[in-house]
Amino acid sequence: MGQLVGWARVSGETQNLEEQLIHLANAGCEKVFSSKHSGKEKGANQTKLEEMIGYVREGDTVVVTKLDRLGRSLREVLNTVDTLKDKGVALKALEQPVDTSNNDAFSNAMLQLLGVFAEMERTFIVERTQAGKARTGNYGGRKKIIPLNKRVEIQQRVKAGEKQTALAEEFGVSRQAINLIVKGK
């Protein structure tokens, strides 16, 4: 049997890891990795998590108090679980019914349900984003500097023989912008 390796994370510098560390020690973890960074702060937290993943070996078990300590979304958690699984490393959540070291049906079902919920979460995020874009009419991209009526005027003036450089100066944009307007873009 391998080593028990703990992973603890809190979202901010002002939060305390102590409770998680006590639970991990009581669970028999011989080594504990920890991070005091928001899940949004990719750099520091990701580096610590990668350090822990690099440390564990086949036969080891990573112990967490809760699965959400492994990432800020179910997708991130499941990616970490898959990475551990690929290395032959089990995962145990002390406060949830997940222990992949036993390879029991209930733990496997819990992980599969988490996968379903992760997919639902992703779908909901996409739907909310699309609904927000439709509601505001903001689909991204830069705002047009020159309104449509002025664009038509520019196209007509270029057709009449005016120089794009002079129009660019007049409208306060680059010659490239005038060229794109002439091309209808």
Image (cartoon, helix red, strand yellow):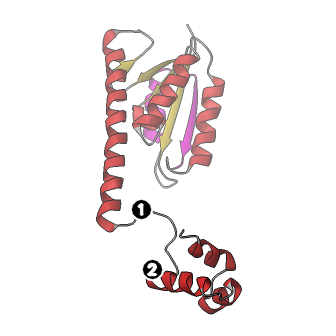
Using residue 74 as the reference point, say whether residue 173 is left or right of it.
right
Measuring from the top left, give residue 118's x and y in whole percent: 36, 34
Residue nearest the viewer, comparing 63 with 51? 51
The answer to which image quadrant residue 110 occupies is top left
Q: Is residue 8 left or right of residue 52?
A: left
Name the disc covering residue 148, or none: 2
Amino acid marked by disc 2 = Leu
Would you call the spot at circle 1 few (<14 residues within 10 Å), some (14-19), or many (20 or more)? few
Front position among marks 1 and 2? 2
- Considering the numbered disc 1 on the image, is that residue within a helix, a strand or a loop? loop
Can residue 29 be seen by looking at this rendering?
no
The segment highlighted magenta reads 17-37
Instruction: Categorize mark 2 by other alpha carbons within 10 Å: few (<14), some (14-19), many (20+).
Output: few
Q: Nearer the viewer, residue 7 or 17?
A: 7
Residue drawn where x is 37% and y is 22% of the image = 111
Q: Which mark is residue 54?
A: none
Residue at (50, 65) in percent of width and height: 141
